[in-house]
Amino acid sequence: MNINLTLFGQMVTFAMFVWFCMRFVWPVIIDAMEERQKKIADGLDAADRAMRDLEVAQAQAGDQMREAKQDAAGIIDQATKRASQIVEEAKQLAIAEGDRLKAAAAADIEQDVNRAKEELRIAVASLALAGAEKILETSVDDTAHRALVDQLATQL
């Protein structure tokens, strides 16, 4: 193998090319790679944060669902209690209305009894007057008088 000037020229050219690449090309490539590496690391960190946020959000959603179920159960209990209260109030009103109607019916019955008694008194009075007229028209005989009174008593 023959070492000549071409080989030395190629070595010098290669050394200059390596120096040029190290001086001007590699820093740009290394900066681009570091920037890309930083973006990837930031993206992975953001993904980890998003996963943690997702877990926290899921836990909060579960808590909110439990609270909503508890609130719904409370509302249902309140509605049930209110319905029972409304039914009880309706029963009380119905009892009061029944008592009022019963009192009104008793008052009507009492009025009818009083009216019947009054009519009976009027009838007795007219029968007594009729009996008195008959007694006065006939003689005032004691036996006739007793017979008329007995007859009036049977009519009453």
Image (cartoon, rainbow, N blue to C red):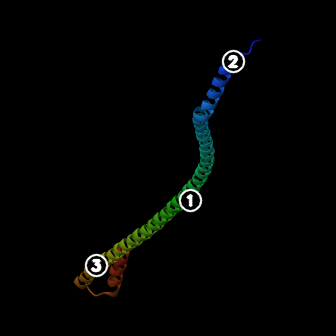
Mark sitting on residue 7 = 2
Q: Residues within 10 Å of mark 3 (few under 14, many from 20)?
A: few
For label 3, the residue is 122
Q: Earlier in the sequence, mark 3 or mark 1?
A: 1
Residue 75 in the image: above or below residue 108: above
Q: CA distance from mark 2 to mark 1?
A: 94 Å
Mark sitting on residue 83 = none
Say what secondary structure mark 1 lies in.
helix
Q: Quadrant of residue 18?
A: top right
Mark 2 or 3, which is nearer the eye?
2
Quarter occupied by the C terminus = bottom left
Percent across and percent down for residue 92 are 47, 68
Q: Which sits in the foreground, 48 or 43?
A: 43
Q: CA distance from mark 3 to mark 1?
A: 71 Å
Q: Residues within 10 Å of mark 1 (few under 14, many from 20)?
A: few
Q: Which sits in the foreground, 118 or 8?
A: 8
Three-letter amino acid code at the position of disc 2: Leu
